[in-house]
Image (spheres, grey):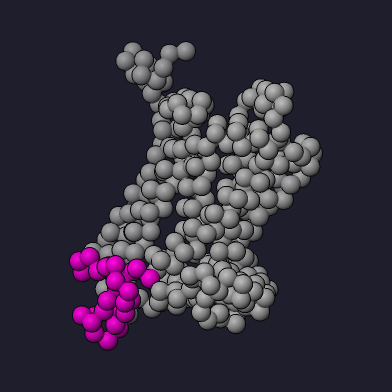
Amino acid sequence: MRSFRDRIRTGRPRGVWSALPPLAAAAIPLALIAAIVVTLVRAGSGHGWLLNLGLDWNPSTGEPSLSNFGVLVFLVGSFATALPALALVLLFSLALGAATALYLPRRISLVLNGFVDLLAGIPSVVYGIWGFWIVAPVFGTVINPWLNGHLGFVPGFGGPVPSTGVGIPLAVFVLTLMTLPLTAVLVRESLLAVPVTYREAGLALGATRWEVFRRVLLPFARRRIGGAALLGFGRAFGETVAVFMVIGDATKIPVNIFDLSYTVPGVLVGQFDSAFVQPNYLAALAQLALVLLAISLLINIGGRWLVGRVGRGASLVPGVA
């Protein structure tokens, strides 16, 4: 069959028109992103660039000239929750991937993977309510005091511990559960994409399953695992409702890992209704949403590029591009 370009050159209109529906469908996501960007730019214009990297977030509703929109507090809160959640979810994803690829029988692996995939179908508000009402008292009375008592000499683990349980540790816990399905699927598929002959060759040479996992599977799947980590980080960084319900919503730099904090998506959903009383307040939130969109797009594009790089022809041999 001739290609789409050849049909255009030969002047066959039927081939051109038959290709328009898939091209239009492929253009819909780009059009939606462009529409969102245009909307945010228009909402954030007219007052100059209002955001800064300061610590003071003070939208003065009485006198707009006294307002200050320092976003460093929210950036610190977002990274302080997303990065530890990413580390935990990568650890669990690698363990699940190793169990699926090397240790467990196929039927048990299917059941385990099904339970992990079910976590993706739970609404984020359910995670938030469950975390606030059920898990927070456990963190406030058991986990956080234990960590403070045994690791208080480590910088960041000392100092006061909120008795309510809400704060950064609870937000990290909830984010780990919410990010696990996406990251676990990508890591699992990355490990299973390694040719079976390589695994069998390692076992035939006398290597243990752990050695095959560490010296064969991980080096060959490292690019895709890195992409899975980026996609998981993007998912954690942009999570809104659940984190907003369990992090405490305090506009200050945390004094330790148990403290309350605030995230970029959280301030958008938490203060959006109050921003309509002041034009530059609403413009500042629109600019903050534009920053969040740019960060999320960059993270997701980088992650998908890494995940798909091997499939597009990059070498599987470690150390060879």
Which of 120 and 57 lies nearest the eye of the viewer?
57
Q: Is residue 133 visible?
A: no
Q: Quadrant location of residue 105? A: top right
* Residue at image location 23% in from the left, 82% down from the top: 66
Q: Quadrant location of residue 253? A: bottom left
In the rendered structure, does residue 53 fall within the stretch colored magenta?
A: yes
Which of 90 and 292 lies nearest the eye of the viewer?
90
In percent of width and height, residue 172 lies at 55, 64
Farthest front residue? 153
Q: Is residue 195 visible?
A: yes
* Residue at image location 52% in from the left, 59% down from the top: 84
Q: How many marks?
A: 0
First to last magenta residue range: 47-73
Query: Is residue 221 toward the left or the right of residue 78 in the image?
Result: right
177, above or below 134, in the image: above
In percent of width and height, residue 24 lies at 41, 36
* Residue at image location 27% in from the left, 86% down from the top: 62
Q: Quadrant location of residue 64? A: bottom left
Q: Quadrant of the C terminus?
A: top left
In percent of width and height, residue 243 lies at 53, 67
Which of 130 and 313 lies nearest the eye of the viewer?
313
In the rendered structure, does residue 114 fall within the stretch colored magenta?
A: no
Farthest bottom residue? 62
Query: Is residue 105 toward the left or the right of residue 272 in the image?
Result: right
178, above or below 211, in the image: below
* Residue at image location 33% in from the left, 49% down from the top: 34
In percent of width and height, residue 158 lies at 52, 76
